[in-house]
């Protein structure tokens, strides 16, 4: 019965209690222990004490082991991590459990939750650190001083530093600060007066710090025996406070200088208070003003009263702060423009209780703005409706404002131009002019500047313009932006170019006529040489079948000669009208036709011709030009063949996007491009010693190709051969 009673008392105990044996297995425990460590009713069987605790302090383990050895142990609190993961501070008491005459058979463990107390202590320490508040004590009986950790931190001394009274006093800045703390401490000791002061100390590291020093006095038998107090780092707050004071003083002076009136309206008492500047602004004497809201409202111009009172109503109700311009009427009838601002102050319940605000006279400002507005309107009308382009350009060369004429000239909308710089659509060759514009206009040395520039129209066309620039200066006399006038002279320039083109065409035609003899000589000489070779072969040939083949070749050569003569009139027009005569021509047919016209030369030189050209490849070309080009390249390959090897000429074609690439590769003498590459297509330029070399073949070929919107390039290695690359548009 007794055992049952003990067991009941243990289970129902309000504290966490457990009984363990010498192996630290549970014998029994209270419900509080069971709940704290999440144990079930069956967990007491062979369940080890330390298995039920996630993280056990070493000090607790030691204490339990000492309890098993007969030693009682008490601790004021350690951190435990419970099975739930919760951290708790637990205070323990461990009492050895002994069965009479049998030695110690276990221990009784009492646990008390002191988490709340420990958190308060921790928070207190943290608060001291965060708030930078330390404590100090002056024991007058033992003549000792004690500083807490934070107090030492503020003084920037080591934690093992032990001050005396003189050393503590000497930390204060020499002069009024040290004198004041000396007086306050002396008075506290002598008269028992507490103190609360803000002074500057010089820390051990030489830093100036504002501190708040407070002291209380402990008196025994009428004599001061101890001083205790706090010591707080207020450096940041104090400096802000001093700065605020300085700003406030400056603001006060500024308000007085700027003639700003300050007012305060007590909404509860319906009491309106003005400073002296408010009376001046409203032209009212103090004895003539009741201080009521109605008195103020009576000064407002009738036309502005409704809006001003509505704004005031919203401010009074806390809906929106007052921020209005309104007119008032002085007693002499003069009308003044007033700017008013206010802030509504509410109580803890959100009810508006007070308004504070400021008023200042902006009459002169509005008058100046009106004059400026009129001037601006005049300029704007001139700007917008000008027959020539006009713009405002910033120092970064961005368009700031543009008129319709400028937009029309450049093809951009106003929004499009305002997103870009003038240099973004300036012709690359005229960008130096933009640099000149920026340098001369925005360095303040030039009042006006005129220059001619080219711009790109939105459609890609070039727009020629004469630009007039006038800088506009800011209040400091420095150019802030520039007014530019844009005179579009594109039509004039195009007329001039047409005249120049006509002159160039005439000159080109004259040049073509000058070279006509050379062209005729080159093209007809190939046919003449071919006819001569075929006639020679015919005269020497005795075989009747061979003579018939040669006769056919002579007939074919004669036809080619006739066609070439028919084309000579087109050849002379290499500089003009080529694009109008473009036709879709088969590359393969033209090559075959051209090779037929020189078959005698090919036969005489035992030349090998390799043709890899598709029947499907057609180009846009002038027939006469294409024949002349192929003939020139082929005869050059034969003319400048290597004496050491049989001539081999490869002709290939392939498509390249919308182009046809035709290549002619020979194994002849080659050309030294390092020496002659820059003049390879020049007039009268020769690179080999040959009796028929005139230096016009490649010149004419290049001109003919380019007149058909084509290109020609060359690769060559001395004594290896040459490759010509011709690109023409697909037909």
Image (spheres, grey):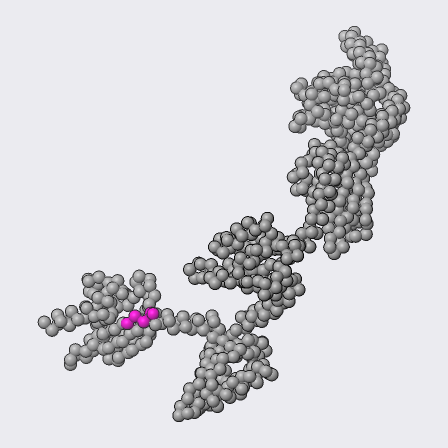
Most foreground residue, 341 or 549: 341
Picture residue at 61% right of the left edge, 69% below the top:
249
Picture residue at 70% right of the left edge, 32% below the top:
459
Picture residue at 82% right of the left edge, 24% below the top:
575
Q: Position of residue 380 (x, y in %)?
A: 71, 42
Most foreground residue, 313 or 27: 313
Q: Is residue 631 above or below residue 368?
A: above
Q: Position of residue 180 (x, y in %)?
A: 55, 84
Do we see residue 246 in this rendering? yes
Q: Position of residue 579 (x, y in %)?
A: 76, 22
Q: Position of residue 635 (x, y in %)?
A: 81, 23
Q: Is residue 328 above or below residue 513?
A: below
Do we see residue 665 in this rendering? no
The answer to whether 483 appears left or right of 75 in the picture is: right
Residue 688, picture quadrant:
top right
Q: Is residue 64 magenta?
A: no
The answer to whether 296 appears left or right of 545 in the picture is: left
Identify the magenta region.
Answer: 112-116
Which corner quadrant holds the C terminus?
Answer: top right
Residue 174, picture quadrant:
bottom right
The answer to whether 577 appears left or right of 13 in the picture is: right
């Amino acid at each position: 019965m007794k055992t049952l009673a003990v067991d009941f008392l243990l289970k129902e105990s309000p504290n966490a209690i457990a009984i363990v044996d010498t192996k630290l297995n549970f014998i029994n425990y209270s419900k509080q222990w069971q709940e704290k460590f999440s144990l079930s009713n069956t967990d007491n069987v062979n369940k080890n004490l330390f298995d039920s605790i996630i993280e056990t302090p070493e000090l607790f383990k030691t204490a339990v082991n000492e309890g098993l050895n007969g030693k009682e142990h008490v601790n004021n609190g350690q951190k435990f991590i419970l099975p739930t993961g919760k951290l708790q501070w637990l205070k323990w008491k461990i009492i050895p459990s002994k069965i009479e005459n049998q030695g110690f058979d276990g221990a009784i463990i009492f646990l008390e939750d002191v988490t709340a107390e420990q958190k308060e202590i921790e928070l207190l320490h943290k608060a001291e650190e965060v708030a930078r508040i330390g404590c100090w004590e002056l024991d007058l009986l033992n003549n000792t001083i004690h500083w807490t950790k934070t107090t030492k931190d503020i003084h920037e001394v080591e934690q093992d530093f032990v001050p005396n009274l003189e050393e503590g006093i000497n930390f204060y800045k020499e002069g009024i600060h040290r004198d004041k703390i000396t007086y306050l401490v002396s008075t506290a000791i002598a008269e028992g007066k507490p103190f609360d002061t803000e002074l500057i100390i010089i820390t051990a590291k030489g830093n100036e710090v504002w501190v708040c020093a407070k002291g209380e006095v402990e008196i025994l038998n009428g004599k001061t025996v101890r001083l205790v107090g706090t010591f707080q780092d207020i450096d940041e707050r104090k400096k802000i406070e001093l700065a605020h004071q300085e700003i406030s003083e400056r603001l006060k002076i500024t308000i007085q200088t700027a003639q700003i009136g300050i007012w305060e309206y007590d909404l509860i008492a319906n009491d309106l208070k003005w400073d002296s500047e408010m009376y001046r602004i409203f032209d009212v004497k103090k004895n003539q003003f009741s201080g009521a809201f109605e008195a103020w409202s009576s000064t407002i111009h009738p036309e502005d009263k409704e809006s001003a009172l509505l704004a005031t109503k919203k401010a009074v109700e806390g809906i929106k702060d007052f921020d209005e311009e309104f007119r008032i009427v002085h007693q002499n009838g003069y009308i003044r423009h007033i700017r008013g601002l206010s802030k509504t102050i509410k109580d803890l319940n959100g009810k508006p209780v007070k308004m504070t605000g400021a008023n200042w006279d902006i009459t002169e400002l509005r008058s100046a703005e009106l004059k400026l507005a009129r001037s601006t309107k005049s300029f704007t009308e001139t700007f917008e409706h000008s027959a020539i382009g006009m713009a405002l350009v910033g120092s970064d060369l961005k368009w700031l404002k543009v008129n319709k004429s400028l937009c029309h000239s450049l093809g951009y909308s106003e929004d499009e131009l305002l997103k870009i710089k003038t240099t973004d659509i300036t012709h690359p060759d005229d960008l130096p002019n933009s640099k000149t514009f920026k340098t001369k206009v925005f360095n303040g040395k030039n009042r006006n500047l005129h220059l001619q520039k080219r711009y790109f129209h939105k459609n890609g066309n070039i727009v020629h313009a004469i630009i007039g620039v006038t800088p506009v200066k800011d209040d400091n006399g420095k150019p802030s932006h520039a007014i530019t006038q844009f005179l579009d002279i594109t039509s004039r320039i195009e007329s001039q170019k047409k005249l120049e083109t006509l002159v160039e065409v005439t000159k080109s035609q004259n040049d073509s006529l000058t070279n006509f003899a050379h062209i005729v000589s080159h093209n007809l000489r190939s046919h003449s040489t071919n006819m001569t070779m075929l006639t020679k072969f015919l005269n020497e040939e005795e075989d009747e079948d061979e003579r018939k083949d040669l006769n056919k070749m002579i007939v074919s050569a004669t036809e080619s000669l006739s066609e070439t003569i028919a084309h000579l009139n087109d050849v002379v027009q290499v500089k003009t009208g080529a694009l109008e005569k473009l036709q879709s021509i088969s590359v393969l047919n033209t090559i075959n036709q051209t090779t037929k016209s020189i078959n005698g030369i090919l036969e005489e030189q035992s030349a090998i011709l390799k043709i890899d050209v598709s029947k499907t490849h057609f180009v846009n070309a002038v027939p006469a030009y294409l024949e002349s080009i192929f003939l020139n390249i082929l005869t050059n390959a034969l003319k400048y063949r290597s004496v050491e090897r049989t001539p081999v000429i490869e002709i290939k074609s392939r498509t390249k996007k919308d182009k046809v690439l035709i290549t002619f590769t020979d194994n002849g003498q080659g050309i030294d491009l390092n020496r002659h590459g820059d003049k390879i297509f020049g007039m009268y330029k020769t690179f080999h010693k040959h009796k028929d070399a005139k230096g016009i073949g490649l010149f004419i070929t290049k001109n003919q190709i380019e007149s058909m919107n084509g290109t020609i390039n060359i690769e060559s290695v001395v004594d290896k051969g040459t490759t010509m690359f011709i690109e023409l548009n697909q037909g």
